[in-house]
Amino acid sequence: MSVKYFTRQSFVLFVADEINDLTDQLGESGRRVMEIEKGCKRLEMERDQVHATLEETEALVGQEQGKLQRLQVELSNAKTETERRLAEKDEEMENVRSVTVGIYIYTIHRVCATLSIPDMKYCRSYTTFATTPSGQMVMLL
């Protein structure tokens, strides 16, 4: 290790150079700090925008969930109403079918009686019925 000896003037110049270097470093550090602060502010603004967007999206999701629930209730009600109407129509058709079959049987018997057909077996053959597996009555010809 060597020891440097300075004269007063060279020492002052050396110290002045060191001060200039330190001043430059301090200025550069200040610029970096300002850039970092700007970056932090920009990130805070972006975070606030993302947070606001998230809140808006959550509100929209809530609204859409409400709409979905209302539509599901409406669909359920419509399905129930349709099933009820179908059951009524099935019952009406069964009643009409029963009445029609009854009228048909009555008409056949009346025709047989009017024509004075002696053997009622002939008339009964036109009024033979069977029940299907679904429970409907069908006429066998």
Image (spheres, rainbow, N blue to C red):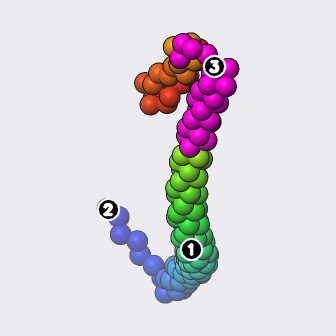
Mark identifier at residue 59: 1
The residue identified by callout 3 is 116
| Residue 60 or residue 28, whichever sits in front | 60
Closer mark to the observer between disc 1 and disc 2: 1
For this orientation, the residue located farthest to the left is 1
Determine the image quadrant of residue 123: top right
Q: Which residues are magenta?
A: 94-120
- Which label's residue is closer to the chain start, 1 or 2? 2
Q: Residue at x 40, y 71 (%)?
A: 4
The residue identified by callout 2 is 1
Label 1: state its secondary structure. helix
Indicate the amino acid at tag 1.
Ala
Report if residue 42 lies within the magenta region.
no
Q: Residue at x 57, y 62 (%)?
A: 74
Q: Residue at x 53, y 53 (%)?
A: 84
What whole-number distance in Å separates the C-alpha atoms at marks 1 and 3?
84 Å
Determine the image quadrant of residue 125: top right
Closer mark to the observer between disc 3 and disc 2: 3
